[in-house]
Amino acid sequence: MQYILSIIIITTLSLAQEQNYIWPTDASKTVTAFFGEMRPHRYHTGIDIRTFGINGKEIYAIDDGYVYRIGVSNNKYGNVLYIKLQDGNIAVYSHLSKFNPIIQRVAHQVQNKQQSYTIDYYLEAGLINVEKGDIVGYTGDTGGLSGPHLHFEIRDQINQPINPFNTNLKDFFFDNIAPIPQSIAFIPKSDTTIIEGTYFTKKFNLNKIDDNNYNLLDTINIIGDFGIALKIIDQVNGQPFKYGIYSLELLIDSISTYKINFDMTSFNQSNQLYIERDYELFSREKDEYYRLFKSEFGKNYFIEDNSSQKNNSSSGLHAFKVIAADINNNKTQISGYFRAKELIKPEKNYYQLNNGSWKIDFKGIQKIYKVNAHLFNKENINEKIEPLYDIVNDTSLVVHNVNNTYDVLEFDLNTLNGKTSKEYILLNTPPQDINGNFFINHNEEGIIVNFIEDVFSNKSANLKYRKNGILHSTPMIRSAKNILSSKLFSFNDFLLTQDIYIEYDFDYIVSKKMNIEKMATYPNLFSQKTFKNGQIIISHQKETFFDSTIVYITQPFIKNFNNESIISPFYIGPSSTPFNKPLGLSLFLPSQKNLTNMVVCSYDDKNKEWIPLETALDSINNILETQIRAGAIVGVIKDTKKPKIHNIVPRNNATYLMEDLNNFNIKLTDDFSGVNYQDGIKLFINGKSILTGFNLYQEKLIAYIKENITIGKNTYELTVYDNANNKSTIKGSFFIKEK
């Protein structure tokens, strides 16, 4: 390696030369993550190379160039090195345990000069030149909580990440495995869209024909505008990991309507992730689906400009085909059919026969030629049986041998008129009361109000509300066995609604009211509003949302929360619409005398636990402040547990050789709110403040003390705060001797 300690003039090399990079590390050639994969609130901008849990593996300059940027931080990239290559591209090496000695010395000098552990330092061209194959650092686990690995990127001359496997680096591993689809989803795109009888997104399994071909066995019945989304993974020979896809193309009736290639991106469009992957499916079910239609919000570098925003096909049968490819051009084809035709909802009368069978008479249909029917008990809807039945006089259905075990009949029909919507019949006396909970289905197109029945009722109902002082009523459809759903409201219409309730009509009226507070948001305006009688203040900056929408607060659907919650937990939406920027929350708690140890938390329903959010305290006004990046259940928890200090090296009153003690090694943990590693760690050696970092993966203090210890007795004092302002302090001493 050539080190030049003075600024030199270097000749600009031709950028047209063919790339001939070497692999960036000796750790392995196993890649655990590809470019363009989904990460929280962003795209993965490089590849992850496996180190098998080992730190200290050599990393190399992949080509000739010079070091132009050095970064050190407690999170994100950790120790990161940027090398500008002779072709003009930038190689980025992240999460390093350390740099090579020359670069490490520069980093220490900058930290001492800036009196900050965190640095982001640019070097002049030619100050530190490197040749292809030179050791420039060592793999590690600094920065994010992802464990030891090398996160490697290639960026172009204007600092935009490009796919590293669009270079010769993909030649370092063999891959002939085609992408593997998991399932396909059809997504409503208008207030009139119905997919297989519901207003909601519907997922379908795929049938495998061979390794390169899959199909959808059933023809999907659709009314209105819709989009298609695909859940799919890629794999590589000899590697156990599941990867993101490289390219997707959708064709409808042999015409290309959408195409995406993960070639390059921009840090300015990381917020486009949740409008390219279907956010509703991700937020509700944690499933990653690639949308095969373009969002109307902003430009995404991955998506070709001529891609469409939705599919609005003419009436009749249509064929679709999805072609998926990986970076090595292994291809998979998924095909199927959908029918643009309105589902029939016939009138019906039903009654029990003397032999215990049930007869259903239909009006408005010509002939029944196929029945799909199941029986189940309303207390156990997951266990179903197929009943015996007869079609009588073409327009009636008789279901036989119904005993008391089964009290719900579920069915749909294929008729000469077309396919009917799914129907449910309760085969006993209606309930005397109906209990359940409201929830909102909120997406980019609008809002649907849903009511989940605790016990299946089989009764129809209307959603009633006031708008501009006038009482309105709209029928609700049974979108699932125990879920009733309203029509889709536009955001403006829903904003104006008041006194929302569901009303059932038996021989008497049963009604349930929805408690909701809401505010309008606009992408180009700052907004702020108080909720819950002034307890909660919600604010958002410009461009917090991609489009005009509604923020709302309701009671959480989930019950039986931990009673440590200081204020009644509340649900804040939307949860199925992506945020472009965080939403601000301020919680005013005048009844609490001391908020010092309070932490705002969100509730993880999957793991049944509270997750602390980064919380700021305004003790003068008794306000806790935080931000959320998605709709969530929010509450306040009191944290009184101090952080813990473990495994202290140097040990108290122990003696060490000067050459054996370079760093202060301590493990720091906290049981709830977490160690405040940004500014909550204070270390003094011999009364002098020492710059400290924190390894999030190992939960270890990072402190270089070599320059601050002397022969003889040395003292230390360490104070650690958690994010709820609880603190722990230790003091001690150690001795340094000469050889």
Image: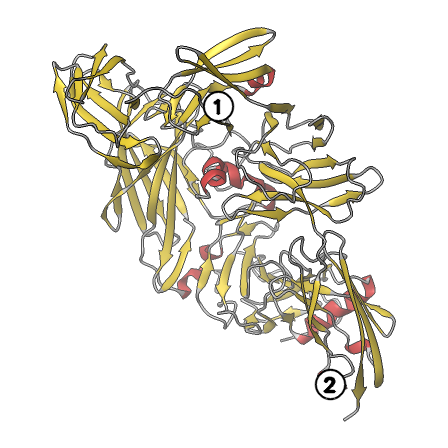
Residue 209 position, x and y percent, is 21, 46
Q: Is residue 584 above or below residue 190?
A: below
Work out whether residue 4 can be spotted: no
Secondary element at tag 2: helix
How much space separates mark 2 and mark 1, taking CA atoms? Answer: 68 Å
The circle drawn on residue 448 is 1
Residue 176, how many percent across, how many down?
31, 58
Frontmost residue, 355 versus 467: 355
Please, is residue 672 above or below residue 216 in the view? below
Pointer 1 local density, CA inside 10 Å: few below 14, some 14–19, many at least 20: many
SS at mark 1?
A: strand
Q: Residues within 10 Å of mark 2 (few under 14, many from 20)?
A: few
> In the shown orientation, is residue 125 left or right of residue 559?
right
**Which residue is denoted by mark 2 in the rendering?**
659
Foreground residue among 504 and 51: 504
| Whole-percent x, y for residue 631 in the image | 58, 36
Q: Quadrant of the N terminus?
A: bottom right
The amino acid at mark 1 is Ile
Relative horizontal placement of residue 115, taking residue 291 as reference (left or right): right
Quadrant where the C terminus lies?
bottom right
Q: Residue at x 49, y 68 (%)?
A: 22
Q: Which mark is residue 486?
A: none
Residue lying at the far right of the rendered structure: 687
Q: For residue 342, which quarter of the picture?
A: top left
Q: Amino acid at mark 2?
A: Glu
Position of 545 compared to 249: left or right?
right
Between 557 and 119, the residue placed more toward the observer is 557
